[in-house]
Structure formats: structure tokens, C-alpha cells
Image (cartoon, helix red, strand yellow):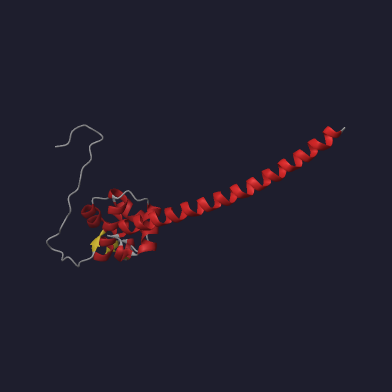
Amino acid sequence: MLTGDATQKIVKKPLKSPNKSADAFRTISEVAIELALPTHVLRFWETKFSQIRPLKRGGGRRYYRPEDIAILRQIKTLLYEDGYTIRGVRKLIRDVGLKNIKGAKNNLDKKSRVNKASTLETKTEVSAQLKIEYRETLEKTLEELIALEEEFCKD
């Protein structure tokens, strides 16, 4: 029973049509119900992820293949559960590939740690080099100031 609370959400449960096989194509409405997502989100994701390619029939009606649904499910998990952004998911797919996404978070964490370590080393090296250059510049400036002081003090 629904209450008057405007913030209450209706959660749709996955729909498994007894008349369709697991390999059957699904309409956007069926996929939206199965994944508990609005249809406009699915259409938006089609524009952001080239891997999602539903068949479009007359009148623009979309039919999703089982592979498309699996990809959508992975994208939904990455966005809503793992906290990725759309840009992050696109980068993940580009770097790791769709087939390797399940273990991708751990792989990226390792890669990220390596990148952070190498970045830190690079920053340390640059910092040390800059310190040497600044020190040399300061020493040269000090020598020039001492020479100027000696000239003015002679008079």
C-alpha cells in the first residue's frame, strides 16, 4: 500500500517472462523492469557506451540481446554499487575490456598504487633538482650582493 509520502520509491522486481527463453530479445520496458532502471537511463547509456547495441526495428523500437543486458547489468553495478562515474566506467572498459571488468576494480587499485608510487618518486626527483637549482641561484645572488656591498662600502 502506498502512502502519501512523496519520497517513497517503488522498487520493481526482476521480471522473468515464462513465455520467453533466456536467449530471447527483450524490449526496453522489459529490460528496465529487470534492471530496476528507468527507460530514459537505458537510452542515455546507449549514447555513452558504444558496447550497448540493441536492435532497432520499425518505429525505433529497441530489442536488447542477452549480451546487451549483461553489459547493462555490469554498468549498473559499477555506477551504483562501486561508485564509478560514467567517465570512469568508460575508461575502465577501454583499459581493461568488458570481459575483465569483474576483477577490474582490484586490477585498477594495483595499477593506481603503482602509478601513485612512480608519481611520488618523480615528484621527489623534481623537487630535489629544483632545490639544487634554487640553491645555486641563491648562492650566485648572494655573491653578487656581497660584491655590490664591497663596492659601495669602499667610498
Asked if residue 65 can be seen in this view, the reply is no
Image point 31% across, 59% down: which residue? 104
- Of the 4 image quadrants, the one containing the N terminus is top left
**Towards the viewer: 122 or 20:** 122
Image point 26% across, 57% down: which residue? 73
* Residue 84 at x, y percent in the picture: 35, 51
**Towards the viewer: 81 or 127:** 127
Left or right of 116, for residue 82? left
Image point 36% across, 54% down: which residue? 44
Left or right of 134, for residue 23? left
Left or right of 125, for residue 86? left
Q: How many marks?
A: 0
Left or right of 105, for residue 14? left
- Of the 4 image quadrants, the one containing the C terminus is top right
* Residue 125 at x, y percent in the picture: 53, 53
* Residue 96 at x, y percent in the picture: 35, 63
* Residue 150 at x, y percent in the picture: 81, 37
User: Is residue 113 placed above or below 19 in the rendered structure?
Assistant: above
Residue reaching furthest to the right: 155
